[in-house]
Image (cartoon, rainbow, N blue to C red):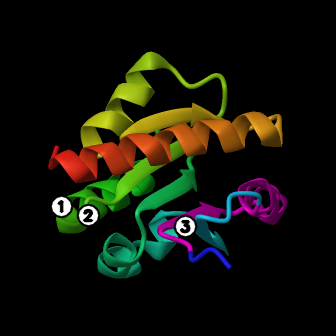
Amino acid sequence: MTTPHRSILVISPDKSLTDSIGTALSSHPELRVETHSSTLAQMNGSAVTIEQKFDMVLFQTRSGDQDDLKAIRAIAAGQASGTTLVALADRDITLAEALALNRAGVRDVLPMPEIAAEFGEQIARLGREHATASATGK
């Protein structure tokens, strides 16, 4: 049996989305996936725990959500363990909104997944990049 060596937290108020992503990622035995039907801002009180327990946090956000930006900054401020934050946004997100997420501490902004296989490939790529950066100390 393969022991998971990467952990991903998926946060979205849309339970069908978290279930879909969880299912897509379950085909990767090296991943431990946990899902929460919530918003990132609602979990902000858990920022330190999030940052210490997971290699990657995927969260759904709405364009210009100031509460999410505040939560991102709180998590990013304590990123000693190198947790990668990835925002799932609607396809109509503006460049300015994507930049605001990046400046707050989000590594990547991905369009809401439409095809589970494609999404799984994107996350696998991010996981490889995270592992390489962790190994090289970047």
Question: Which residue is tagged 1?
Answer: 77
Please state if 9 lies on the left or on the right of 83 as rendered.
right
Question: Where's the C terminus, which quadrant?
Answer: top left
Question: Where's the N terminus, which quadrant?
Answer: bottom right
Q: Residue at x 43, y 28 (%)?
A: 97
Please state if 21 lies on the left or on the right of 67 as rendered.
right
Up/down of 138 relative to 4, above or below: above
Q: Residue furthest top?
A: 95
The residues tagged by marks 1 and 3 sit, at their Cα atoms, a distance apart of: 18 Å
Q: Residue at x 36, y 50 (%)?
A: 131
Mark on residue 74? 2
Work out whether mark 1 precedes mark 3 in sequence or the reverse, and give the earlier one.
Answer: 3
Question: Which residue is tagged 3?
Answer: 9
Confirm or deny contact between disc 1 and disc 2 (CB under 8 A): yes
Work out whether mark 3 precedes mark 2 in sequence or the reverse, and give the earlier one.
Answer: 3
Up/down of 19 relative to 49, above or below: above
Label 1 environment density (alpha carbons within 10 Å; few <14, some 14–19, many ≥20):
some
Please state if 45 lies on the left or on the right of 40 as rendered.
left
Query: Start and end of the magenta stretch?
Result: 4-26
Q: Secondary structure at mark 2?
A: helix
Q: Nearer the viewer, residue 131 or 7?
A: 131
Camera sees residue 106? no
User: For the residue marked with disc 3, what is the amino acid?
Assistant: Leu
Q: Position of residue 54 (x, y in %)?
A: 42, 70
